[in-house]
Image (cartoon, rainbow, N blue to C red):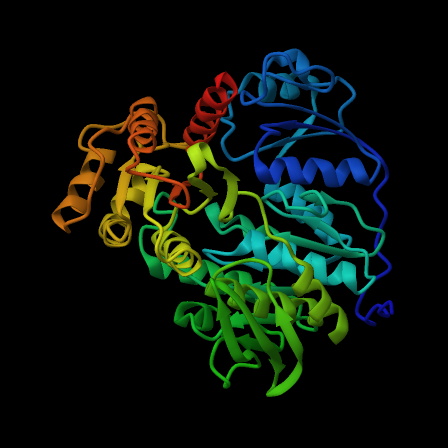
Amino acid sequence: MDAKLPEFLAPGVQAVAQTAHFIGIHGAGMRSLSRLLAGFGWEVTGSDPMLASSSAGRFQLHAPDNVPEHADVVVCSDAIAADHCERQRAAELGIETISYADMLGRLMLDRTGVAVAGTHGKSTVTAMTGEILLAAGLDPSIVVGAEPIACQRSGRAGSSPLLVAEACEYRRNFLKLRPRCAAILNVEPDHFDCYAQVDELTDAFGQFAAQVHMHGRLIVNEDSPRAVSAARRADCPTETFGFEPSADWSPRFLLANNGFYDFDLCHQSRSLGRVRLRVAGRHQVANALAAAALAAAAGAHEEAILVGLSRFAGLERRLELAGMPGGVNWIDDYAHHPTEVAAAIETLREMMPISRLWCVFQPHQASRTAGLLEEFAETLRMTDRVAILDVFRAREGAPAPGEVTAADLAERIRDLDGRVIDVHAADAVEQTLAEAIEVGELTRGDIIITMGAGDVGRIGAGLSKTFSTRRMAG
């Protein structure tokens, strides 16, 4: 049964097809946004240094000539400097250049925005919400910064006015959005290059809450004190989600089975029905509650909420089983904050409690590593063995004297009696893991998890290639 669009949904403005060039199109958010525009009928070109030199057609490595002379707009990721050759070419041609967040904000102006903010869980809750709205027949557009597994791609152009998107706090980018409905999942210290104090971060989330339409709805995590504080600045009605019955949206009769949870989904103490999640981890229950509340605010009926949550298959790089080198389970995960790392480790311990768990962690930015060094060390020491790769700097430029390093984090883990692999270069770590598999220190059923927002997954890919080649050689 298809849902009827709520009265607050405007008819939506179908954008006139234009041409957009994306600088840094390989980035998750940029890729998703480019797909959305292509779905709306735009001509989309793009470039990125991550693309192979053999890439042909409309997607190329960086070069001034990549910018189409007839482009209406050039969209840049936050990693693209003002003196980038393609930005300079766009200026010469008189083409407007805007950020990813600005472009998303413009698209949302003509649509009914549904935005997901928070330190953790944005991609999953955005994708879950989109899955529910699809089940409800509301045909949303979706921009999510990760690739869904076994369902729609990360950027989807729908026919309804609904636009569901992540709202990123980095550089206060989410303040460029004017959503009708929104969620604040959590607020924890992060982005130390933008927010010197956590109070500044909470204030930014408060500004975001204040921008939600007064006739819309804000969903807030009752279990996150800073999120609750930020939500007080909203002018719209609010609803809470959380594990306690006091929340507007909560789970009842919560059961775990090897890390996978099912529960009665309750709204204001009334059970809507049973949900059995296909994604592992207790943290996914909280994500499901937020998605249910947000989708309901956007017009989804109860049956669609249950169906959408139960069929959501997850996202790539979120505890994704990516291979089995030598019979060892290689799990790849995006976690790059201590809370996310802890959730991943706890979930794997639930799923495979007797397996040895070896972790390869790639710190993401020196500023985050320094600001959360103790929290990272406390969490990572809970693995059986851990390797710390060199810091993935991401926008930070060359290392400065005295900056925190992978060796500093490794030493702190050792201080806490954690077992740390002594090398930090990717090739050396991969070799150490391969030797552990060869001698049976890691064996069938054990786990190697690669974690981080950078390119740490290449280690698992290298192991998979090595052991696959050896099997083929007989």
The answer to whether residue 99 of the structure is visible from this angle is no
- The residue under the point 54% across, 23% down is 50
Residue 59 image-quadrant placement? top right
- The residue under the point 29% across, 23% down is 428
Q: Residue furthest front?
A: 474
| Count of labels in the image | 0
Q: Is residue 15 above or below residue 183?
A: above
Q: Is residue 428 above or below residue 12?
A: above
Residue 60: give x, y in percent of width and height.
Answer: 64, 17
Residue 63: give x, y in percent of width and height.
Answer: 60, 13
Residue 375: give x, y in percent of width and height.
Answer: 26, 54
The foreground one among 282 and 48 is: 282
- The residue under the point 43% across, 33% down is 326
**Residue 44 in the figure: left or right of residue 257:** right
Q: Residue furthest left?
A: 415
The answer to whether residue 255 of the structure is visible from this angle is yes
Q: Residue furthest bottom?
A: 269
**Residue 183 in the figure: left or right of residue 435:** right
Residue 413: give x, y in percent of width and height.
Answer: 19, 46
The foreground one among 126 and 191 is: 126
Q: Is residue 382 above or below residue 282?
A: above
Quarter the N terminus occupies: bottom right
